Amino acid sequence: MGNIVAIVGRPNVGKSTLFNRLTGQRKAIVDSIAGVTRDRLYGKAEWAGRKFSVIDTGGYIIGSDDVFEGEIRKQVQIAVDEANLILFLVDAEDGITGMDEEVANLLRRSEKKVMLVANKVDNALRQTQSAEFYSLGLGEVHNISAMNGGGTGDFLDEMVAALPDDPEEEELDIPKIAVIGRPNAGKSSFINAITGIERNIVTDVAGTTRDSINTRYNLFGKDFLLVDTAGLRKKSKVHENLEFYSVLRSVRAIEDADVCLLIVDAERGFEGQDLAVFSLAERNKKGVVVLVNKWDLIEKDTHTAKRFEDNIREKIAPFSDIPIIFMSVLNKQRIYKAVEEAVNVFERRQQKISTSKLNDLMLPIIQATPPPATKGKLIKIKFCTQLPTRVPSFAFFANLPQYIKDPYKRFLENQLRQHYDFTGVPIQIFMRKK
């Protein structure tokens, strides 16, 4: 688990703008209406070779009866509890407000490392005005303008220097398999059935698992780590502090895994929340196996499984080359097949193809079906190789790589999948200048 940086402060001081600048993406909704950020957003950032995760919290509002604002307060508290470093953002244009003082009191009590950041400092007058924030008693005031980037370079240098050293993780050369899915789909029951140990609490209350639990296990002569994650659910359904915490831990467990077993409730079908969890694993380039649990409760005819499977593949396209296993944890039906397939996906993820074999395969295919000409220019791919990365990644060297579009990259990926077994494994295709 790497370092987590939480951005906190009252509404409308620019937290989401700073989040976007740190993570390099316009993921957070930025609006001048106070309280637009209603839930924590989570992203990854890197500066000066240090990688860290960033949480953008909703505005911390004191003395309000609004339930919604009360929920925002809970989120900030959990973000503070979970973070290694807290960025307390204030507005140099408005100066110190009563809410800023309340947040400062909370942060002083937290005993966490805090950096006080004055935003919207984009002229000499604001630079002078920001000195009043020293009275909050939180040390040095760092002046920035999150909107135009002013002062952010120096600030980030100091921020990464303030982060604790990245923890050294024990590198085990065995698969880490995360059991993921919406609450109450049967994740803990699945691990209990596999291990034969009633280690994880199993109840019919959604969200019972509040944290990630690692279990080292051996099956069929294969050694691996099973990670039971807390149930991921729609943010609108998450009401308790513990659940806010568990959602964050689940995301981190997916980041840390090699292969994810996505458990789907057969009675509910493959819904939007299942797709969101799948997308989270796919975005992190993890191997994926979909397990349809409670299959024993479904009324079936000859084509039921085929229809269910086609529906899932349609929803997860274009990454539809994944194993789908229908099982029943209650009856211990095909549960060992599920683990066996996860280990197979891990091994496929590790496979390396020699450059000579790759070129012998791909160059004739490319010659027969070249990239379409763009602006009257012929595009020629002359060489390809597999990159030395943890995730299967392939570089294709071309005279005009900038003109090769995503549909052709998908064509190349499909050709690789047809000739090599990458079932359940995301593939990355990169175009480079020859």
Image: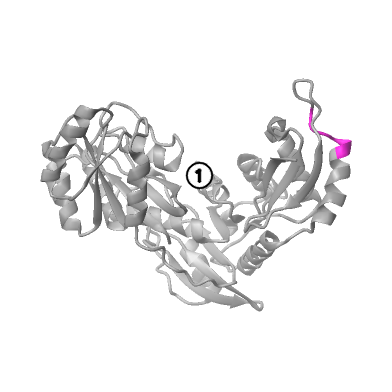
Residue furthest top in the image: 375
Residue drawn at the location 59% of the way across and 59% of the way down: 296
The quarter in which the N terminus is drawn is: bottom left
- In terms of depth relative to the viewer, which is nearer, 360 or 220? 360
Residue 411 screen position, x and y as percent: 76, 39
Asked whether 369 falls inside the magenta stretch, the response is yes
Q: Is 256 placed left or right of 335 in the picture?
A: left
Q: Magenta segment, which residues?
A: 367-372
**Does the image show residue 183?**
no
Left or right, residue 135 beside residue 119: left
Q: Which residue is mark 1?
A: 276
Q: Nearer the viewer, residue 124 or 412?
A: 124
- Specify the principal SS of the magenta part: loop
Q: What SS does tag 1 mark? A: helix
Q: Nearer the viewer, residue 404 or 300?
A: 404
Judged from this view, the residue extending furthest toward the front is: 124
Residue 150 is situated, as x and y percent measured from the top left of the image, at 34, 34
The residue under the point 15% across, 39% down is 131
Instruction: Give the residue at x 39% y 53%.
Output: 248
Name the quadrant containing residue 392: bottom right
What's the residue type where badge 1 is placed?
Answer: Ala
